[in-house]
């Protein structure tokens, strides 16, 4: 059973003075898809189960981050829905910690059967990875994924009552940039907010090369014209890095853009990542991080764990350095191991 550790006061700031209120917590590094920009065709060997934090350990980690001011928790992977006990963790976060903003990034392959239970447990938002609405393109980019299964999962989430659903589309030149209007139309018809993400040179994403990145400026210009968009009165909705445009005819319909490569947003970063193995990653581009696992399993006090967290975040760099000469350590980052 998950327990409540003592409360440790204090705010969570990094060395740049950025206040971190958003925890991305990976619950597994396993995934049932093999997306081209995430892993090689043979997949990535998952970590031994004894190296992955237990549900109880994950709960303790969230408790300590909550005590330091974290208001949003996003569960990630790998694919978080392949992890047994994730509903128990969600319920603990909401009922015992009082955190209301509990989100998940998922590929939705298991949502058809799990959506209703997750909502009952307390899940409030989901982002679904959806790189194409063309079944052949989707299968190619995910190496065998079934688009119908994903769309069924999204519909199950809507039926279960999730009101805040977003899709994440990694735009790759020469692969799916011809589908953008179709994706927006489909999303709006289903009361979903679509978002387009620049391809980042992380892990196998770096294999595509700089020319495969489609700048958000190009996307905004194109979609703004074809879909009649204008700057949103809620351009940045506050939780994360996405900037939004809205429909001129219906301001409730928005399109988000995440521009990590061409429009660096590190100055307003408000998040910290913890991997499924308990490593703190101050930045998605960090190739390594301090591990909380020895303290969690070795009788470490809450204060010792907090100090380790603060030490790790003190080393957070001002910026990630994508496509900067002499900065390539982020090429070694494996998205499925970090939590994307």
Image (cartoon, helix red, strand yellow):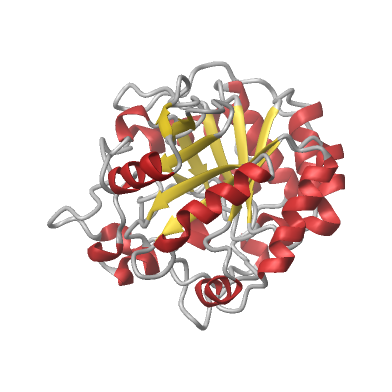
User: At which x and y percent is residue 8?
Assistant: 60, 20
User: At which x and y percent is residue 140?
Assistant: 52, 77
Please tell me which residue lies in front, 6 or 34.
Answer: 34
Does any portion of residue 75 appear in the rendered image? no
User: At which x and y percent is residue 84?
Assistant: 79, 57
For the N terminus, the quadrant is top right
Does any portion of residue 66 appear in the rendered image? yes
Residue at point 39%, 32% (across, down): 269
User: At which x and y percent is residue 74?
Assistant: 61, 40
Left or right of 23 in this view: 97 = right
Q: Is residue 83 above or below residue 145?
A: above
Residue at point 73%, 25% (across, down): 97
The quarter of the displayed image where residue 91 is located:
top right
Q: Is residue 96 above or below residue 203?
A: above
Q: Is residue 305 above or below residue 331?
A: above
Residue at point 36%, 28% (across, down): 268
Please tell me which residue lies in front, 108 or 73.
Answer: 108
The number of callouts visible is 0
Q: Identify the residue at the far left of this view.
A: 325
Left or right of 230 in this view: 201 = left
Residue at point 51%, 70% (across, down): 35
Left or right of 151 in this view: 92 = right
Please tell me which residue lies in front, 272 or 136.
Answer: 136
Please tell me which residue lies in front, 262 or 121.
Answer: 262
């Amino acid at each position: 059973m998950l327990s409540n550790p003592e409360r440790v006061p204090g705010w969570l700031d990094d060395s740049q003075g950025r206040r971190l209120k958003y925890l991305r917590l990976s619950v597994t590094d396993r995934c049932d898809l093999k997306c081209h920009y995430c892993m090689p065709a043979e997949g990535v060997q998952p970590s031994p189960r004894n190296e992955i934090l237990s549900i109880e350990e994950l709960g303790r980690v969230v408790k300590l981050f909550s005590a330091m001011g974290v208001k949003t928790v996003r569960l990630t992977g790998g694919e978080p829905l392949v992890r047994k006990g994730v509903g128990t963790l969600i319920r603990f976060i909401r009922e015992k910690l009082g955190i209301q903003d509990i989100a998940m990034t998922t590929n939705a392959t298991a949502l058809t059967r799990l959506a209703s239970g997750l909502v009952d447990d307390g899940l409030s938002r989901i982002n679904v990875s959806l790189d194409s609405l063309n079944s052949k393109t989707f299968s190619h980019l995910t190496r065998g994924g079934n688009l119908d299964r994903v769309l069924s999962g999204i519909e199950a989430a809507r039926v279960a009552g999730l009101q805040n659903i977003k899709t994440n589309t990694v735009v790759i030149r020469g692969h799916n940039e011809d589908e953008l209007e179709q994706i927006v139309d489909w999303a709006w018809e289903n009361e979903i907010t679509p978002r387009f993400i620049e391809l980042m040179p992380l892990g196998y994403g770096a294999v595509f090369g700089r020319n495969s990145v489609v700048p958000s400026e190009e996307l905004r210009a194109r979609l703004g014209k074809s879909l009649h968009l204008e700057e949103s009165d809620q351009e940045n909705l506050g939780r994360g890095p996405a900037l939004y445009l809205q429909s001129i005819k219906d301001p409730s319909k928005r399109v988000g853009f995440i521009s990590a490569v061409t429009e660096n947003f590190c100055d307003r970063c408000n998040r910290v990542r913890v991997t499924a193995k308990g490593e703190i990653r101050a930045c998605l581009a960090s190739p390594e991080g301090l591990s909380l696992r020895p303290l969690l399993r070795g009788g470490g006090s809450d204060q010792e764990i907090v100090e380790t967290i603060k030490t790790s975040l003190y080393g957070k760099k001002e910026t990630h350095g994508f496509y900067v000469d002499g900065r390539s350590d982020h090429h070694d980052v494996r998205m499925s191991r970090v939590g994307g």
